Amino acid sequence: MNLPDPRHALAAAAVSLSLLAAGPAGSAPLATCHVTYGGETVAHAVPAVDDPHAVPAVAVGSYFLIRFVLQTRPRELAAFKAYVYADRSDAPVLVHQLDVAWPPAAVRAVAGGTGGGAGWGFTGLNRVYEPTRDGELQYWCGREGR
């Protein structure tokens, strides 16, 4: 059984602050991502950034790193991206990536959480599994103010 890692809450605060510092594309969060791991759910505010490479990955438990990037300009590059990495001792390894055009198309309501007027927001519910520890990370993202 995976127990909640106290670093998770601190990491959520750190990512929110670092996202705000990554660029002035938007001061207010445009999306919120809900990450569940080890029975704990943490909400991550996701503002738009000018430099997607400046957005750091944050630890989720002792195995995963996660990174949410929202770029709204230039318009032809506008996208929301989520990256989940396995935090290996030698280097992080990308194990999951999600790309959504921004702004996202309207989605139909489905059972589950709330966000963006739909059950699992504009990303749907995503699950990423730990192959060695039998753990599961879940996340979904919804638009703010919708």
Image (cartoon, rainbow, N blue to C red):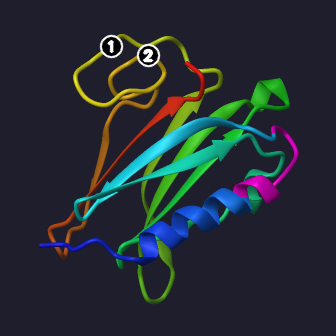
Q: Which span of residues is magenta-colored?
A: 19-26
Under mark 1, the amino acid is Ala
User: Which numbered tag is attached to residue 53?
Assistant: none
Gap between marks 1 and 2 measured at Cα: 7 Å
Q: Is residue 28 magenta?
A: no
- Main SS of the magenta part reads loop
Labels 1 and 2 touching (C-beta < 8 A)? yes
Please state, as top left, top right, bottom left or bottom right, where the C terminus lies in the image.
top right
Q: In the drawing, does residue 51 fall left or right of residue 13?
A: right
Q: Which of marks 1 and 2 is nearer the N terminus?
A: 1
Residue at image position (44%, 16%) is: 117
Residue at image position (63%, 44%) is: 46
Under mark 2, the amino acid is Gly
Q: Where is residue 8 in the image (x, y as percent from the top left)?
A: 43, 69
Can you identify the residue that label 2 sits on? 117
**Furthest residue in direction left, as rendered:** 1
SS at badge 1: loop
Q: Is residue 34 placed above or below 80 in the rendered structure?
A: below
Q: How crowded is mark 2: few (under 14 residues within 10 Å), some or many (20 or more)?
A: some
SS at badge 2: loop
